[in-house]
Image: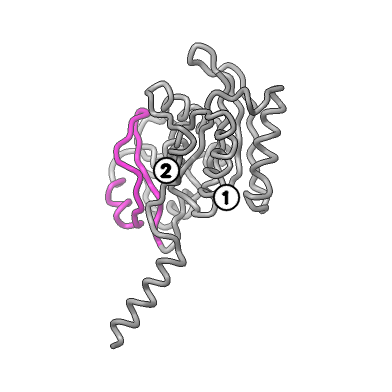
Amino acid sequence: MIVLAIDSTAVCATAAACIFENDKLVTYALTTSKNGLTHSETLLPIADGVMRLLGKRMDEVGLFAVSAGPGSFTGVRIGVSLVKGFAFANHTPCAAVSPLEALAKAHEAFPGVVCAVMDARRGQYYNALFQDGERLCSDRAVGTETLCAELADGPVLICGDGAELFCERAAMPNLRLAPACAREQNALSVALCGHRLMTLGQAVTPDKLSPVYLRKPQPEREREERLSKGDSAK
């Protein structure tokens, strides 16, 4: 089966075309770009490119996997919309992957807790904790102090686009920053997670695929703050 996976939830735009045989990954092409361009400029060419590298067509894809959130609101929408556009043509199944779970996938062998953190701004992180490939909590938005209290004991590997910032703020001796080459999102992990969802019967039809937001968009939050301040001033 051919799986096309993409992630545009953070600063990287990444796509992977993968071939699975007997539920094992045997061939793949992976491209990741962090070049300052917008995802609307880079994501489609990258997705087309990895398919060409395998000599495959979009109508041969058996599963589209996408990091559906949490993450950048614009990035999440771009990724989900692109996959829905690909999938609707042939009613191809889709897998909505957590980018936090995909981040942790690359570090399953770490002998301790894997803490995936994405910068959610305003002193918060999109976060989930994993150990031995299993989830310890749901995806959430959490502050630095709260997360530090949960990570006080044992070795902890920090990965994600918020990893450096969190490690600087936390300044805890038991935290280990993931290597730069495996710190941020890559679509190969998304493909592996998406394939697992399909084997568990958790793939969805294109019309059921939707973004996952843990917080309201910033303009809406700012509007509510302005209204709240206006009410308190009365």
The amino acid marked with disc number 1 is Val
Q: Are marks 2 and 1 in contact (CB under 8 Å)?
A: no
Task: Report x, y in % for residue 4.
Answer: 58, 30
Nearer to us of marks 2 and 1 is: 1
Is residue 182 positioned above or below 171 on the image? above
Label 1 element class: loop
Task: Report x, y in % for residue 152.
Answer: 29, 47
The amino acid marked with disc number 2 is Ala
Is residue 94 positioned above or below 184 on the image? above
Q: Is residue 182 magenta?
A: no
* Of the pair 131 and 60, the residue shown nearer to us: 60
> What residue is shown at x 39% (from left), y 37% (from top)?
114
Q: Which residue is mark 1?
A: 11
> What residue is shown at x 71% (from left), y 22% (from top)?
55
Residue 129, quarter of the rendered image? top left
Residue lying furthest bottom in this view?
Answer: 234
Q: Which residues are magenta?
A: 123-151
Numbered label attached to residue 84: none
Residue 217, quarter of the rendered image? bottom left
